[in-house]
Image (cartoon, rainbow, N blue to C red):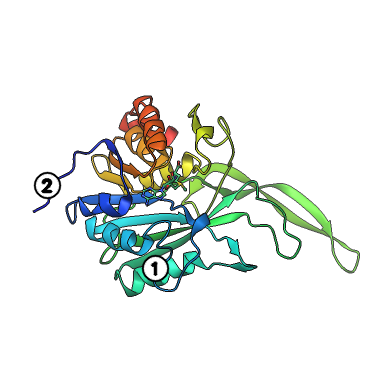
Amino acid sequence: MKRELPVNTIYKCDSAIFLQRIVSRSIHLIVTSPPYNDARSYTHEFNVTVFHLEKILMESCRVLVNGGVFAIVVGDTVVNKSETGLPARIVTFMLDYCHMTLHDTMIFEKNSSGHRESNRYQQVFEFVLVFSKYGAPRTFTPLRDHPIKSSKPWGTRTFRQYDGSLCETERKTYNNDFDVRRNIWKYSVGGRGVASTFKRVSEHPATCPDRLPEDLILTWSERGDIVMDPFCGSGTTCAMAKKHGRLYLGCDISEQFCELSRDRINNTVTLEPEDDNNA
Ligand SMILES: C[S@@+](CC[C@H](N)C(=O)[O-])C[C@H]1O[C@@H](n2cnc3c(N)ncnc32)[C@H](O)[C@@H]1O
């Protein structure tokens, strides 16, 4: 029988092995982003030479509690002139082989883009694929920051119609109320101070902006829950979990990145519950 792994720890390990050490149905939320830039062999496994993504997906589902959520941030890359289709392949695998529920197909829109290509539009987003285990997520705290227009008109404005005549319409303004956020989330990406407050963030080449895992954690977990990232990189998910009073488990194959994560987490302060939404 497996023993519970100590939480609030970053493990230097291949995540396929790390996950095997975790007790079934013990993790509440997984927020992760795999190293998909090198994933290119799709005959049976996604890419056996770089990492065993299918195995990691399967094990991730095993360790989740019922109603637990698996949120994976994944974009597409062009290989041999074709997009790889990795996000779609992950969805198919999770539905067909892991029997997870595809709860929400969300978009992480970036305020900047990679290099321009001559024959396709610029890539400005990644998917955030949100799966839940055996039905609906066990918890959902929607973020309310979508500005809503006031029901009261504020003055009028005029515009010219096709026939040249002027038409007057009511001008609406935004009031101070907010609606539930939509499922396209836009964040700044880039170095320290733009997407992250962590001063060593540039030591990792592919970090998520702090707010992305932070908002996923606030939405799909509760204080005291265990949040895991099997590809923890610079420790963004684990640091945001600690910041909001969750327990965390992280794993990365690189000792250098594990050390980076530990430093980041040690310098992360846990907020009081009432400050969660003002972070
Ligand atoms: C896209 S990065 C994750 C970045 C992270 N979300 C952040 O904000 O810093 C993917 C990470 O997976 C790690 N990795 C690659 N193969 C791995 C494996 N087999 N097991 C564990 N970690 C692995 C890499 O070292 C890299 O840090």
Residue that numbered label 2 is attached to: 3
Can residue 26 be seen in this snapshot? yes
Q: Around disc 2, counting alpha carbons within 10 Å, would you say few (fewer than 14), some (14 to 19), or many (20 or more)?
A: few
For numbered disc 2, what is the local secondary structure? loop
Q: In the drawing, does residue 163 fall left or right of residue 22?
A: right
Q: Is residue 269 above or below residue 220?
A: above
Can residue 65 be seen in this snapshot? no
* Contact, mark 2 vs mark 1 (Cβ under 8 Å): no
How many badges with numbers are in the image?
2
Q: 275 or 229: nearer the eye?
A: 229
Of the residues shown, which amino acid type is indicated by label 2? Arg
Q: Position of residue 21 (x, y in %)?
A: 20, 50
Q: Position of residue 155 (x, y in %)?
A: 72, 46
Q: Position of residue 263 (x, y in %)?
A: 38, 27
Residue at image x 24%, y 50%? Answer: 27
Q: 7 or 129: nearer the eye?
A: 7
